């Protein structure tokens, strides 16, 4: 049995994409996963499974969520070790501004990484490590060009969390 953490993309936005924490737990358990827990209502889910394939886990969760909600819920899964490494890597940047992390469904190519990093400026920097893109933003974060939408344009399906959430989940679940 192994523990994984899933990040659900684009839930609880507007009136038609509601997916409350209790419903996430129930759908995850109905898909056969155990020891399910959530953290805040933005789609952060910890669970245990005997499955070892990330792709199979994501597919099983996405199927269960579609059946439960009636809309697709892209799901991005990490091992505890991977999540802890993302939180630890953030410390190396020594950034004092806004820090968000876009979590990628697939590992990007070097060419794609170069494209997203090229969008950066002195006030907005993207640091890509594996399936995590650290967005280091200054005071202009409300007007930032480096957003999860920019990340998705260049690197594919992603969901975004602030560094506080990433650190909290790593401390709580890893």
Image (cartoon, grey):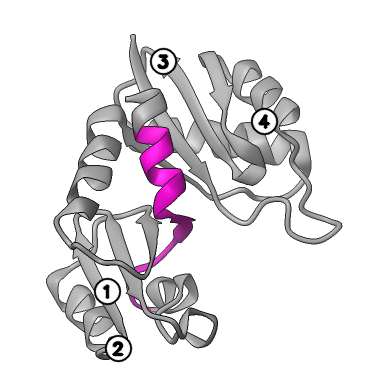
162 above or below 55? Answer: below
Tell us which disc is closer to us: 1 or 3: 1
Q: Are there few (<14), some (14-19), or many (20+) residues within 10 Å of tag 4?
A: many
Tell us which disc is closer to us: 4 or 1: 1
Indicate the quadrant where residue 130 lies.
bottom left
Tell whether position 172 is magenta: no
In the displayed structure image, the side of residue 154 where residue 122 appears, left or right:
left
What secondary structure is marked by label 4? helix
In the displayed structure image, the side of residue 13 where residue 120 appears, left or right:
left
Disc 3 or 2, which lies upstream in sequence? 3
Residue 70, image x and y in percent?
78, 45
The answer to whether any part of residue 4 appears in the image is no
Q: What is the CA distance from the residue labelled 1 to the residue labelled 2?
A: 8 Å
Disc 1 or 2, which lies upstream in sequence? 2
Residue 33, image x and y in percent?
52, 16
Pointer 1: what residue? 126
| Pointer 1 with pointer 2, Cβ within 8 A | yes
In the foreground, 115 or 58: 115
User: Residue visible at 70% across and 21% down?
Assistant: 26
Disc 1 or 3, which lies upstream in sequence? 3
Pointer 2: what residue? 119
Residue 125, image x and y in percent?
27, 78
**Quadrant of the image for the C terminus?**
top left
Q: What is the CA distance from the residue labelled 3 to the residue labelled 2?
A: 39 Å
| Pointer 1 with pointer 3, Cβ within 8 A | no
The answer to whether any part of residue 97 appears in the image is yes
Pointer 4: what residue? 24
Instruction: Check residue 49 in the rendering and tell me which mark sits there, or answer none.
Output: 3
Q: Are there few (<14), some (14-19), or many (20+) residues within 10 Å of tag 1?
A: many
Indicate the quadrant where residue 166 lies.
top left
């Amino acid at each position: 049995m192994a523990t994984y953490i899933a990040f659900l993309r684009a839930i609880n936005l507007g009136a038609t994409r509601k997916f409350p924490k209790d419903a996430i737990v129930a759908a995850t358990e109905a898909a056969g996963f155990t020891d399910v827990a959530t953290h805040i209502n933005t789609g952060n889910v910890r669970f245990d499974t005997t499955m070892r394939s990330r792709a199979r886990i994501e597919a099983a969760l996405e199927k269960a969520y579609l059946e439960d909600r009636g809309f697709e819920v892209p799901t991005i899964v990490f091992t505890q070790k991977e999540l802890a490494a993302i939180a630890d890597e953030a410390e190396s940047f020594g950034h004092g501004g806004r820090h968000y992390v876009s979590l990628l469904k697939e590992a990007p190519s070097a060419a794609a990484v170069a494209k997203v990093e090229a969008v950066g400026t002195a006030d907005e920097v993207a640091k890509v490590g594996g399936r995590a893109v650290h967005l280091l933003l200054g005071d202009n974060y409300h007007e930032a060009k480096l957003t999860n939408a920019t990340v998705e344009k260049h690197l594919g399906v992603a969901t975004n969390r602030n560094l506080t959430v990433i650190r909290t989940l790593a401390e709580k679940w890893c």
